[in-house]
Image (cartoon, rainbow, N blue to C red):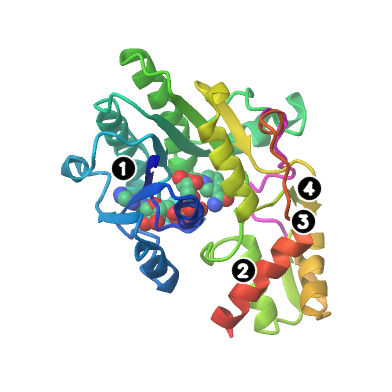
């Protein structure tokens, strides 16, 4: 039975990943401090499984790592302070967890004499590049475009910059400790049940359930791509479990369902069978017009997404509607 550690395992992606691995008989340990994830019914069910262990701990504190074993086959490092409001309101914590936390994880990981570590970076690392130099690079965006901090005085960058620095940290620890078994993934808009309320999809669902009319859309012409959580988990495991990915950076997301935010709202209206008047407002400042990842590397591993946007939105709506009612 393979042993797996998931930092941030009480969060959105972590819980779905842990369930998936536990169902496949992996021995799963979750490390989380509930900075964001919650001890809800779904988490309770997960940690009741005989092959799942939960350790409550903060990755900023070095003593947390004394509670861990030193023989995990796979370490998924997902813990982070996500959520745009947090980037503005608690940028110091975002940076501490993102940078000090990641360095602590790496310092602990190199004591293991085995195993592979996966670090979850973000499409947010591209925002500066796309804003400043968008016309210089083709879209879908390839993993090798340069990463730019657009404005260090804008604390919004606490998150994107922490992801960039963590990526540098992974390569630095790899060099210093001859660490070969690592991979960096950059997630692009994973969505689904229990994803929190801060993302465009749950926000739209909440406003639809509450009968907002006219329905406000900010911008609407911006495009994004969306990847349902089951496909996101499948891709994450594929990247971790393939030896071909060692030392690489790989997008996790989809390039085949780019959609305008306005059309996303219309898809949700169709699913729920409502038809509110739409009121378009100006886009939020700094909003990137087009985001779409090049997923060639992921596809070369054999990844084929299975859940259509319509099906994924329906499943997400079904989960959220009772919460928002
Ligand atoms: N969801 C996406 O579409 C997306 C996109 C880009 C990047 N990511 C990255 O993927 C990872 C997982 O994302 P998610 O959507 O599941 O986020 P999430 O916020 O739902 O989960 C993160 C988890 O980390 C935990 N955590 C935070 N600080 C901690 C600390 N100091 N010690 C221990 N645990 C701590 C939180 O309590 C939470 O359970 C994150 O690193 C995130 O930045 C996600």
- Residue 148 lies in quadrant: top right
Ligand 1: does it lie within 8 Å of the C-beta at label 1? yes
87 shown above or below 133? below
Question: Residue 96 has which mark?
Answer: 1
Real-space Cα separation, disc 2 to disc 4, in angstroms: 19 Å
Between 86 and 311, the one nearer to me in the picture: 311
- Within 10 Å of the Cα at label 3, are there few (<14), some (14-19), or many (20+) other Cα atoms? some
- Within 10 Å of the Cα at label 2, are there few (<14), some (14-19), or many (20+) other Cα atoms? few
Real-space Cα separation, disc 2 to disc 3, in angstroms: 20 Å
At mark 1, the secondary structure is: helix
- Residue 181 locus on image (x, y percent): 43, 23
- Residue 114 locus on image (x, y percent): 33, 26
Tell me, yes or no, whether the two marked residues, 1 and 4, touch with CB atoms within 8 Å: no
Residue identified by numbered label 3? 308
- Within 10 Å of the Cα at label 4, are there few (<14), some (14-19), or many (20+) other Cα atoms? some
Tell me, yes or no, whether the two marked residues, 3 and 1, touch with CB atoms within 8 Å: no
Question: Residue 131 has which mark?
Answer: none
Tell me, yes or no, whether the two marked residues, 1 and 2, touch with CB atoms within 8 Å: no
Residue identified by numbered label 2? 203
Q: Residue at x 71, y 33 (%)?
A: 299
At mark 3, the secondary structure is: loop
Q: Earlier in the sequence, mark 1 or mark 2?
A: 1
Q: Earlier in the sequence, mark 2 or mark 4?
A: 2
Instruction: Tell me which segment is drawn in magenta.
Output: 281-297
- Of tags 2 and 3, the one toward the viewer is 3
């Amino acid at each position: 039975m393979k042993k797996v550690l998931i930092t941030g395992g009480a969060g959105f992606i972590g819980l779905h990943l842990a369930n998936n691995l536990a169902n496949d008989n992996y021995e799963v340990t979750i490390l989380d401090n509930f900075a964001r994830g919650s001890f809800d019914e779904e988490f309770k069910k997960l940690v009741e499984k005989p092959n799942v262990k939960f350790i409550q701990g903060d990755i900023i504190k070095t003593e947390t790592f004394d509670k861990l074993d030193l023989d995990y086959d796979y370490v998924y490092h997902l813990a982070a302070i996500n959520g745009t409001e947090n980037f503005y309101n608690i940028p110091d914590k975002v940076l501490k967890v993102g940078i000090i936390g990641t360095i602590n994880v790496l310092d602990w990981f190199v004591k293991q004499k085995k195993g592979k570590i996966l670090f979850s970076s973000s499409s947010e690392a591209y925002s500066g590049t796309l804003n400043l130099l968008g016309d210089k690079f083709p879209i879908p965006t390839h993993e090798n475009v340069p990463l730019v901090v657009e404005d260090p005085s804008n604390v919004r960058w606490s998150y994107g910059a922490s992801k960039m620095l963590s990526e540098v940290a992974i390569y630095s620890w790899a060099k210093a400790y001859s660490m070969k078994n690592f991979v960096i993934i950059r997630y692009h808009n994973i969505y689904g049940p229990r994803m929190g309320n801060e993302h465009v999809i749950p926000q739209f669902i909440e406003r639809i359930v509450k009968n907002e009319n006219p329905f406000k859309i900010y911008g609407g012409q911006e495009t994004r791509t969306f990847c349902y959580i089951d496909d996101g988990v499948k891709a994450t495991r594929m990247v971790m479990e393939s030896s071909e990915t060692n030392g690489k950076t790989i997008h996790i997301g989809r390039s085949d369902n780019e959609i305008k935010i306005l059309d996303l709202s219309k898809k949700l209206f169709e699913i729920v069978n409502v038809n509110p008047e739409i009121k378009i407002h100006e886009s939020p400042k700094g909003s990137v017009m087009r985001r779409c990842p090049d997923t060639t590397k992921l596809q070369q591993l054999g990844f084929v997404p299975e859940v259509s946007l319509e099906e994924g939105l329906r499943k997400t709506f079904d989960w959220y509607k009772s919460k928002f009612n």
